[in-house]
Image: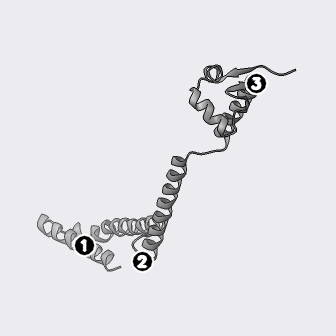
Amino acid sequence: MSTPSYPVKTIARLLDLTERRVQQLAREGVIPKAESGRYDLVQAVHGYVKYLRDRAVGETSTADVFSEKARLTKLTADKLEIEIARQTGQLVDAAAVKREAFTCGRQVRDRLLKIPDKLSPELVTLDDAHAIRARLLSEFREVLEGLASG
């Protein structure tokens, strides 16, 4: 018992394709041809569904491949730039910078907090605002110069 075959127009309407596209798919072996200009309906549907499933699962378009290659090339170049900057000293470890900034901040705080204990006995004897100001400025400068020199 032979299965009925249908013209390309019917297969195209059923698969929502143009007749030309059905013929292209037949040449590519996606849709099997039954006889001249006619197609087995079940085999045509099965072939086309398998074709769509394969495309959805495994294949990527050429544009996707080029896009991914370009992305990979850029990432590789960026990584190389970072490595060169690190080796030439233009790039430093962020954690190390944070530790150093914390240490510097702590030193500034500690030295400034020592000023009242150091100057209180001396300033209590002064009654001239200009002399008090000059002594405070002198002590601040001394602390800041000490911090700057290391």
- Confirm or deny contact between disc 1 and disc 2 (CB under 8 A): no
How many badges with numbers are in the image? 3
| Amino acid beneath label 2 | Thr
Q: Residues within 10 Å of mark 1 (few under 14, many from 20)?
A: some
Return the x and y of residue 79 as percentages of the image width and height: 49, 65
Return the x and y of residue 122 as percentages of the image width and height: 24, 71
Q: Which of the numbered marks, if any, corresponds to residue 42?
A: 3
Q: Earlier in the sequence, mark 3 or mark 2?
A: 3
Tag nearer the camera, 3 or 2 = 3
Under circle 2, the secondary element is: loop
Q: Which of the numbered marks, if any, corresponds to residue 7?
A: none
| Amino acid beneath label 3 | Val
Q: Taking 130 as reference, is 21 above or below it? A: above
Q: Taking 56 as reference, is 102 above or below it? A: below
Outermost residue, right side: 1
Q: Taking 46 as reference, is 118 above or below it? A: below
In terms of depth relative to the viewer, which is nearer, 14 or 57?
Answer: 14
- Confirm or deny contact between disc 3 and disc 1 (CB under 8 A): no
Residue under label 2: 88
Q: Is residue 91 left or right of residue 30?
A: left
| Residue at (59% x, 23% y) in the render | 16
Return the x and y of residue 118 as percentages of the image width and height: 31, 71
| Amino acid beneath label 1 | Glu
Q: CA distance from mark 3 to mark 1?
A: 97 Å
Under circle 1, the secondary element is: helix
Which quarter of the rendering shows the N terminus?
top right
Which quarter of the rendering shows the C terminus?
bottom left
Q: Is residue 13 left or right of residue 144?
A: right
| Residue at (61% x, 20% y) in the render | 13
Dividing the picture into quadrants, the one containing residue 91 is bottom left
Q: Earlier in the sequence, mark 3 or mark 1?
A: 3
Residue under label 1: 139
